[in-house]
Amino acid sequence: MALVNKVDLKLQVDLDVSIKYQIVTYCFFNETLISNSDLKFLSELGKAGKIELTKFCTDLVKQNIFKSSQSARNAITKAEKKELVNKENSNKKKIFLNKEINVQSEGIVLLDYKILGQTNESEEI
């Protein structure tokens, strides 16, 4: 029988931290590199849900995440290429996080990740 070293960590955090953690975890396991400003805007998008692109870019500038609407748009386009953000085509484009990220951003959120890390020589459990 294999011996498992278990790390059990329980934290209570606000919803913003919870959303960021979900995004970072998704990006880590999908080997998607993001910057700190990307994480901030993706977190804001996670809270906003589906939102009109121009309004969202303006909000990001007001929150000092980006210096201009154009730099916000550039970051959104980069995130779209990394398949983190989706756009809905219409007169006023709406953007939202990719559903595969599965960010939970409403109500009380409990994140329960169970990750088993083992070497190649380890026994199967």
Image (cartoon, helix red, strand yellow):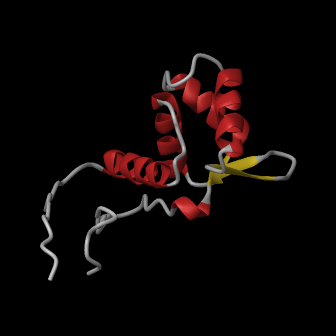
Residue found 68% across the figure and 48% down from its top: 95
Residue 98 location (% of width, % of height): 62, 57
Q: Where is the C terminus found, in terms of image quarters?
A: bottom left
Which quadrant does the N terminus fall into? bottom left
Looking at the image, which residue sits at the far front? Answer: 121
Q: Nearer the viewer, residue 82 or 42?
A: 82
Q: Residue at x 85, y 52 (%)?
A: 90
Residue at the outermost right position: 91
Percent x, y for residue 27?
Answer: 49, 49
Q: Is residue 124 left or right of residue 100?
A: left
Q: Position of residue 14 (x, y in %)?
A: 27, 49
Q: How many marks?
A: 0
81 relative to 117 in the view: left or right? right
Of 113 and 118, nearer the camera is 118
The vertical placement of 64 against 101, above or below, is above
Q: Residue at x 12, y 73 (%)?
A: 3
**From the viewer's perspective, is residue 35 above or below residue 6?**
above
**Please, is residue 123 above or below residue 50 in the view?**
below
Q: Residue 84: x percent and y percent?
A: 61, 49
**One can see residue 83 in this view:** yes
**Residue drawn at (64%, 18%), measured in percent from left and top?**
68
Q: Is residue 110 visible?
A: no
Viewer-side residue, 58 vs 25: 25
